Image (tube, rainbow, N blue to C red):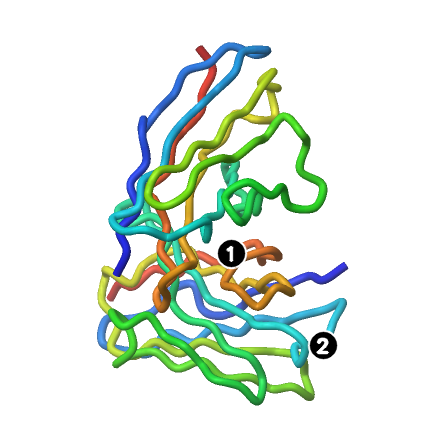
Amino acid sequence: EIVMTQSPATLSVSPGERATFSCRASQSVSTNLAWYQQKPGQAPRLLIYGASSRATGVPARFSGSGSGTEFTLSISNLQSEDFAVYYCQQYKDWPPATFGPGTKVDLK
Amino acid sequence: QVQLQESGPGLVKPSETLSLTCNVSGGSIRDFYYTWIRQTAGKGLEWIGRFRTSGTTYYNPSLKSRVTMSEDVSKNQFFLRLNSVTAADSAIYYCVRDSASGWPLFEHWGQGILVTVSS
């Protein structure tokens, strides 16, 4: 099973700033990496797939990069609605598909 | 627009069977892969399994001995059964429709149902 880790666990950011956080896979997943956003009381929402492709309706301020074992999600010009928990997920080697533990982006 | 809705008991006794239903509207369950995912504060998001009607069903190896996924195409529903539950199975359970790509990418989620295992 591929183990996903994320850092930092919590990131404090001010509105308008840029937030950048990382995801690491225990072995290469190529670009079979997705990012999800989860707000309190809601189900996760698919943001990014293929490491860098935005899902339908996702604003351009969200951008993903990386390949192999190291990935990054960046949010530019952070908006109030972007404060949430972000999870990465690999789908290179499954079953099982596996998720990281999440990075919480909160208000500085 | 596809919508998914989980239903089932919110409380299950230890050693019994957890049974959940996912009702799908806005599209036939014949056309996509569907997945169950659960979430706990301790273990985070855990993929339980995925299936497609008339196709292969895949289970998480850690749960494979206890889990069964099935469907009723006529009712546009699919089901999760998890046997011999313990407190560790207490979680929010989500039913999900995967993306049209065929990859296990989780595009459309139900709102989730909280299941507690307790006597």
**Left or right of residue A23: residue B104:** right
Return the residue nearer the eye: B91 or B98. B98
Residue B94 point in image, percent of width and height = 49, 60
Callout 1: few (<14), some (14-19), or many (20+) C-alpha neighbours within 10 Å? many
Instruction: Give the residue at mark 2.
Output: B28
Residue at 62% over, 57% down? B108
Query: Which image quarter is the N terminus of chain A in?
Result: bottom left
**Left or right of residue B89: residue A35:** right
Q: Which chain does the residue under circle 2 lie in?
A: B
The answer to whether B111 is drawn above or below residue B86 in the figure is: above
Q: Earlier in the sequence, mark 1 or mark 2?
A: 2
Instruction: Give the residue at mark 1.
Output: B112
What is the secondary structure assignment of the residue under circle 1? loop
Callout 2: few (<14), some (14-19), or many (20+) C-alpha neighbours within 10 Å? some
Query: Which image quarter is the C terminus of chain A in?
Result: top left
Residue B47, by quadrant, is bottom left
Residue at 58% over, 84% down? B53
